[in-house]
Amino acid sequence: MNRHRVDSLGPDDEVMPYSDDETDDELEASSEEEPEVMPGVPKLYLILFSVSEMAWKVKANDRPYHQLPEFQKKVFLCIKKSRYSGNDIKTYKYNVLTFLPLNLYEQFKRVANLYFLALLILQIIPDISTLPWYTTLIPLVVVLGVTGIKDLVDDLARHRMDKEINNRKCDVLLDGGFQDLKWRDIQVGDVVRLKKNDFIPADILLLSSSNPNSLTYVETAELDGRSCVLFVSPEALIECEEPNNRLDKFVGTMLWEGERYPLSLDNMLLRGCKIRNTEACHGLVIFAGGDTKIMRNGGKTRFKRTKIDELMNYMVYTIFVLLILVAAGLAIGHTFWYEEIGADAWYLFDNKNQGASYRGFLSFWGYIIVLNTMVPISLYVSVEVIRLGQSKFINWDLQMYYPDNDTPAKARTTTLNEQLGQIEYIFSDKTGTLTQNIMEFKKCTIAGRSYVNLETLKTRPVDWSWNRQADRKFTFMDHSLVARIRSGKDKDANEFFKLLSLCHTVMVDIFPSGELVYQAASPDEGALVTAARNFGYVFLSRTQDTITIKEMEEEEKTYEMLALLDFNSDRKRMSIILKFPDGRIRLYCKGADTVIYERLSPNTRHKETTQTDLDVFANATLRTLCLCYKDITPAEFEAWSRAHKEAQVAMFDRDGALDRVYEQIESNLMLIGASAIEDKLQDGVPETIATLAKADIKIWVLTGDKKETAENIGYSCSLLTDDMQIHYGEDINRQAHRRHGPQTSRQGKKKPTEPFFPAPGKNALIITGGWLVSIDFVDMACECEAVICCRVTPKQKGNVVSLVKKYKKAVTLSIGDGANDVNMIKTADIGVGISGQEGMQAVMSSDYAFAQFRFLQRLLLVHGRWSYIRMCKFLRYFFFKNFAFTLVHFWYSFFNGFSAQVAYEDWFITLYNLAYSSLPVLLVGLLDQDVNDKLCLKFPKLYLPGQQGSLFNYKNFFISLFHGIFISLIIFFIPYGAFLQTMGQDGEAPSDYQSFAVVTASSLIFIVNLQISLDTSYWTFVNCFAVLGSIAIYFGIMFDIHSAGIHVIFPTPFTFTGAASNALRQPYLWLTIILTVGISLLPIICIQFLHKSIWPSVGDKVQQTYSPKRGREHLTELSGRWSRTVSRRSLRSNCFFFMLVCGVAA
């Protein structure tokens, strides 16, 4: 292990960049240029303009007020409606009247569907088309119908959910009393009454609570919990910000009796929450329906597409260009043929006075129709079906189910599954993602003396029997700290835990048994308050103005709370100003060392020793907070309080005004000490990271922790190893200077190609947020096996992901569990949310969700790899079978005067992609696997082909094209040669067009179904049934539509009367079919054999090594389960068993 630092100018590693979480709206706005300020416009005017734009007025229990003309907005022309939304929500897309037109409109926005609609219109023109209209109409209707039914089912589910939510009941104050109304009838300004376990119907301002301590508890699956309280008169007028999607921010004021009172997010109860531990409360509706914050967050999402999607679209464009070129060439051929032969052949005269060029023009459009199957109409709907099935497999995977909190894996999208098999970079949060986010008080330093709580100490845990209120689950090993506190001689130690018991936002529940249960907004606060409780400073209760604690088993003491300076991601600290029972006023503050040390008084003691202890704690991967206090005189507080109230009611830049006021009081602090709490790693994290690293997936950890903490976490989770050369932010300048040295400058402005690390070996980079602006950061970081970015903000997390996507064109995945991870989750190609301790915002913004980080390796190495391989195999085969089918018409053109005649029967063309060749390839796309899940995890190198994109690219596309050309040649010319001057057993020549069409079609069906059999690696009963069933369906339908009975009923569309029975009773023609199939498949079998023998892939080697053993195990298991299944006579279980258990890799 080599670590080195180079002193150089650069960003301060210990400075936390000042930024805040950003919403989608802000991110979009930030990408645009800000408008320039017009010269001569006063700044005050701009401020007042911004305030007016933010104005949202709500009057309690006064519905007519909100219908005044000033609150109307223009909808269309002179039609106006209220700017205040109703409370009914509509997440569905369609209704009875709009479903058909709107769904068809959306489907025809796809170029492929629009293309086939244009072909259908062309087929109606008799002079152009040689194919009946139904050959295009039926496949198009089936594709549109399948997609439409899928959309309808999804939308009906949304209708049911909307109806259930809108019809919930709530008590609303109307006509002097509370009435039971449906949610949909609630309006802005209504006063509602909520009871325990009620869901909150809208974003409401809390007016009152039945709790003795005047607080209300909320629980939510979408938002982080918080406590809220406010007492107002129903006559008050609320002025606040416009509706937005900021879940962490609310700015407003209440105008009542000539006074303005500040409103913030702490006064709000948001829709989506649930009332807990509160019998009843009253609230005022501020935002309703679509204006609520949760509904605003459910809006616009960034559309993500896979690399295969983009490649597939380009290939469809390529096929379209080939189609035009081939049609143009054949049209030119028809022009020359008509001039040389057709015009002079009296028996071809059609009574049309059309020149050769005009006939060639019509032939071009005719061939566009005939060869239209080169552009596969059913490709996109087939891909959607496969992706839907793969998503269901992820949802049903019991090995990704976490029983502790009953959380299964969830694929929240169906469009990105194969992209999971191509990940190159993973960006991970630390707290709650790699760690459990369950905190435990481990160490502390008080007045320069360190106290530890390590299990390695050979002592018994502290006995808490002296403290009746202690949490018996809490353990601590250092008896000296308890002794100093109980003696009362160490004032600093007592002050330390008094601060922990007072400076927080924790809520408390007291059960009838007297047991205390703390409800904390963050696990850190819960751990610290619990520690203070065990050391004798027991937090008992709080109201809006007071906090009550019990000190060292003595009488209870109540402290008046004068002000609460709350914590946020920018301040990195929180403070509380209290008035002691004896009249003293003191500020308590706790926060990160980087912000606390800047605000310490010059007279404070133990700064150096505390800093040394903090470094030791950080090296032990502990989370640290510094604790300090400040005594304030009444006069000083009165002056500050006036400034604080002014800042609280500021409508413009309230946060900035509050920050400036907070800075005034949070200065000249006296240091008490520091706490250290442990956040343990989740189970399986080191093993998961090691396995993903073997798959050449680079993992970056993005965290707000200190550099030392992040580095040690990196070692503990195996992200960093002893054989890695560790580099820091300072090395970027040094390496860049070497890379951009004189030799490079003499080469001009060309970007240097020399690597940052020419020496062999593994490298890792540990960097702070300030270095992310470096131009060379991406190049250097991407050459490292591991990267840790510490002291980064949510915005910077997203920027790091964007940089790698932009400059490396790599497939990225972001994983996190909290609201501060939403930015990078949405920015990455794939976002994964962990349902942990920090709410559900990350899960709501993610593409995939599960409960533990260790499930990531199964998601990528098993489901991702299988999905990628299946999709690639499906697309390669799909293109091949369409080329083989369509290009027979091309060869036939040379024998029919390039007249756009078809080589097959019309109904065969119609049903080829729908019934004869669709099911086997769909099942391969759903079920195929070269190796089982255990081998996928055992050999991570199997993941490499997906990263390299080697299984589906333009090379594979042209291989499929030439394969199709070869098969079409065989299918056409072998039967053509066999039919030439041939006599059947009955003395009749079978060499008619209809018999030829039957033989070529039959040969094609055998070839494409046997070809997919050769490409199938994992055989199940369902695959066998699909292949044999497709062939059987072909012959069954063919004999039906060639029968005399159907021709009598429908003489026009069914013209091949008796063709199948006449042709297939000739042994000679069966020999022709067998010869055609054999010559077509024999080269493929030889090529596959040579490829696996001489140039085997990693998958081939693993398959050859483990398949025989695996097959024997499955056969043994099969015999035992078969007997039990037959004895139970359960056909359903038998089929399921064959499909999911008994498949054997080829």
Image (tube, rainbow, N blue to C red):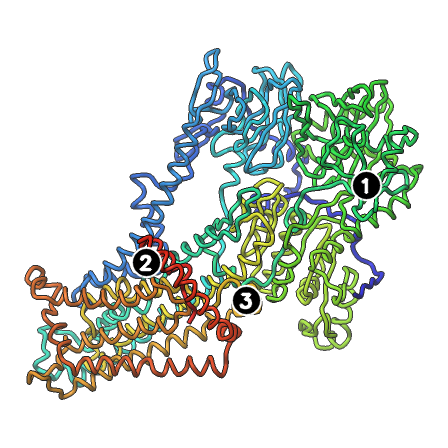
- Residue 350: quarter of image: bottom left
Q: Nearer the viewer, mark 1 or mark 2?
A: 1
Q: Which mark is residue 943?
A: 3
Q: CA distance from mark 2 to mark 3?
A: 35 Å
- Residue 334: quarter of image: bottom left
Q: Which mark is residue 460?
A: 1
Q: Position of residue 1104 (x, y in %)?
A: 49, 75
Secondary structure state at the residue bearing disc 1: loop
Q: Nearer the viewer, mark 2 or mark 3?
A: 3
Dot 2 amino acid type: Asn
- At x 66%, y 57%, the residue is 686
Secondary structure state at the residue bearing disc 3: helix
Dot 1 amino acid type: Arg
Q: Is disc 3 surrounded by few (<14), some (14 to 19) or many (20+) residues within 10 Å? A: many
Dot 3 amino acid type: Tyr
Q: Earlier in the sequence, mark 3 or mark 1?
A: 1
Q: Earlier in the sequence, mark 1 or mark 2?
A: 2
Q: Nearer the viewer, residue 349 or 175?
A: 175
Q: Position of residue 999 (x, y in %)?
A: 20, 77
298 lies left or right of 628: left
Q: Is residue 55 above or below residue 379?
A: above
Mark 2 — residue?
113
893 lies left or right of 780: left
Q: CA distance from mark 3 to mark 1?
A: 49 Å
